[in-house]
Amino acid sequence: MRYRLENGGFLIFLTLVSLGLGLILSAFTGALLWAVLGALLFQPLFQKLLRRWPGRRNLAAGLTMLIITVAVVIPALILTSLVVEQAADVYGQMRSGQINVAVYFAQLHDALPQRLQQLLDSSGFGSFEHAEARVAEAINNSVSMIARQALSIGANAASFLLACGVGLYVMYFLLRDGDRIGPAVLRGLPIEAPIAARLAEKFITVVRATIKGTGLVALAQGGLGAITFWIVGLPAALLWGMLMVIGALLPAIGPAIVWVPVALYLLATGAIWQAVVVVLSGVVVIGLADNILRPILVGRDTGIPDWLVLVTTLGGIDLMGISGIVVGPLVAALFLTGWEILTLQRAARAETG
């Protein structure tokens, strides 16, 4: 009786301390999450450097962090600043009336065949003018949100840089000691060792598949789209390329959600060769990038249905921002794996029982 009481008290103590630690670290949740994800993603690079300099873990971790900073962090900061600048510029032009989305949609509407115009006018929106206003409002709100986020980042530059510094600092130690921390965490989990190992394997698979197979492919497609838009003379090419990245992250949507309307508008306004370039780039170059790059970057998929990836990604973004791109599918994968393990255990007990 005394043992059970003491054990229960110790478990309550652990729960309270864990909650307290979570509250203390809540301000750096995003930074710590990306530190863990980055350490998992670049652990093979660290191990390769460690094999070259055996026993010199600090040196291998330091060189890995240097490569990450030069190849990933600095280019990402530069790209973000350029996108933010273009978003703020487009937002200012919309506010001043230099860019009128409703006029662009009216031009597209007038260039359509008469029968298609009538079909659109009699659609569920009641009239095309209403649809035009709704779409224009959605685009204005989207660009406004990007601009507000940009201003927010600028106003909180110190806290943003602090979070980046904390994330990189923690990533260094996770890289250096990750092969020791991981097994220790698994041993401490109140789960059977085979189940914990299987969940950890699924965790690593989904993280690497999401970042390498989805994130890098989306960046490649967005970059190709930005280059295409720059070639045809579209203003704010980087901004629209970033929107293509967001579209490419979502299954069943893809970057076509951006380049198809752009091609239709160019075609409707008489920019024939520009529209042809956008269509050819979208179908041949951007479309094939996924089929070529994904098998190279990821050897196996996550085993999650596309519809579930879409829903959990959107839900994750709504809940956690950009971190939800990884967290959403990750939670879905662990959910499916957990229920699969439970089903197999029940089947095994039924056979033995």
Image (cartoon, rainbow, N blue to C red):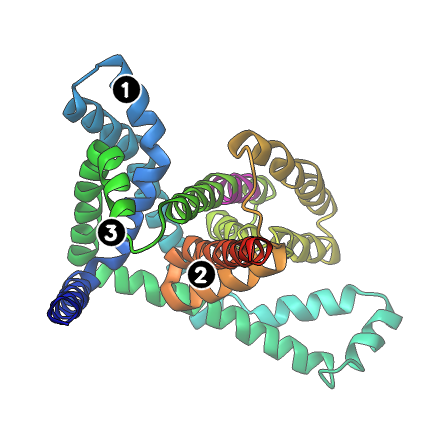
Q: Earlier in the sequence, mark 3 or mark 2?
A: 3
**Residue 19, image x and y in percent?**
19, 67
Q: CA distance from mark 3 to mark 2?
A: 33 Å
Quadrant position of residue 176: top left
Q: Label 1: few (<14), some or many (≥20) within 10 Å?
A: some
* Residue 335 drawn in magenta: no
> As displayed, is residue 138 above or below residue 174?
below
Magenta extent: 214-227
Give the residue type at disc 3.
Leu
Q: CA distance from mark 3 to mark 1?
A: 24 Å
User: Do the numbered discs 3 and 2 sit on residues whose CB atoms are within 8 Å?
Assistant: no
Q: Could one spot residue 156 in this view of the protein?
A: no
> As displayed, is residue 99 above or below residue 274?
below
Q: CA distance from mark 2 to mark 1?
A: 45 Å
**Residue 127, image x and y in percent?**
74, 83
Name the image quarter holding the C terminus.
bottom right
User: Do the numbered discs 3 and 1 sit on residues whose CB atoms are within 8 Å?
Assistant: no
Q: Residue at x 32, y 60 (%)?
A: 150
Q: Earlier in the sequence, mark 3 or mark 1?
A: 3
Q: Which residue is mark 3?
A: 32
Label 1 residue SS: helix
Give the residue type at disc 1.
Leu
Label 3 residue SS: helix
Q: Which residue is mark 2?
A: 90
Q: Which residue is mark 1?
A: 49
Give the residue type at disc 2.
Val
Quadrant position of residue 288: top right
Label 2 residue SS: helix
